[in-house]
Image (spheres, rainbow, N blue to C red):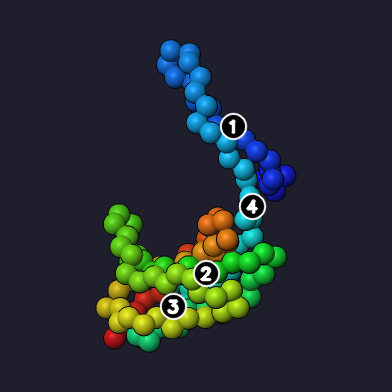
Amino acid sequence: MRQLVGYDFDLKVLDDYGETFNLGAERVERVILDEIEIDSPKNSESVVNMINLQWLYFNPGFKFTYDIEIYTDDDFTQELVWHREGVPADSLSIAVDAILPPKEYVWMIWCVDEFSNRSRSKPGSFKVTE
């Protein structure tokens, strides 16, 4: 995938009648293959409110920020309950500034570069206890 960076591509579609349409040109600016690793909480760890999300040092070699999301851990209808965008790249943790009711949650952290390319961590899970 990294070999595609810098190349221009023409986006074309072929309709049912054999006609080809050029939708425009695009360029791959960056392919993010590195993954952020969650440190805590994870593996259904029990936490009380005043949650502090932590991750390991991440340096992909380009300018970026973090976006962080917490969802309810429901197999059918996960609901976004908290998020923060634009967390500085030198951060290793963030305090959740919301009271989450006792329940199971998953969280993930995204690396977002200057071109809005994104790469997500594996989800971390936790339980809020009273």
Single out the residue that lies furthest toward the right: 3
Q: How far, Cα to Cα, is label 3 from label 1? A: 48 Å
**Where is residue 65 shown, x and y percent of the image?**
55, 69
- Residue position marked by numbered label 3 in the rendering: 45
- The residue under the point 51% across, 19% down is 20
- Residue position marked by numbered label 1 in the rendering: 10
- Quadrant into which the C terminus falls: bottom left
Q: How far, Cα to Cα, is label 4 from label 3? A: 35 Å
Dot 3 crowding, Cα within 10 Å, few <14, some 14–19, many 20+:
few
Question: Mark 3 or mark 2: which comes first in sequence?
Answer: 3
Check disc 1 and report its element: helix, strand or loop. Answer: strand
Closer to the observer: label 1 or label 2? 1
Q: Seen in the image, is 16 located left or right of residue 113? A: left
- The residue under the point 64% across, 55% down is 33
The three-letter code of the residue at mark 2 reads Tyr
Q: Identify the mark at residue 66; answer none if there is no mark.
A: 2
Q: Identify the mark at residue 30; answer none if there is no mark.
A: 4
- The residue under the point 68% across, 41% down is 7
Q: How far, Cα to Cα, is label 1 from label 4? A: 17 Å
Q: Quadrant of residue 127?
A: bottom left
Dot 1 crowding, Cα within 10 Å, few <14, some 14–19, many 20+:
few
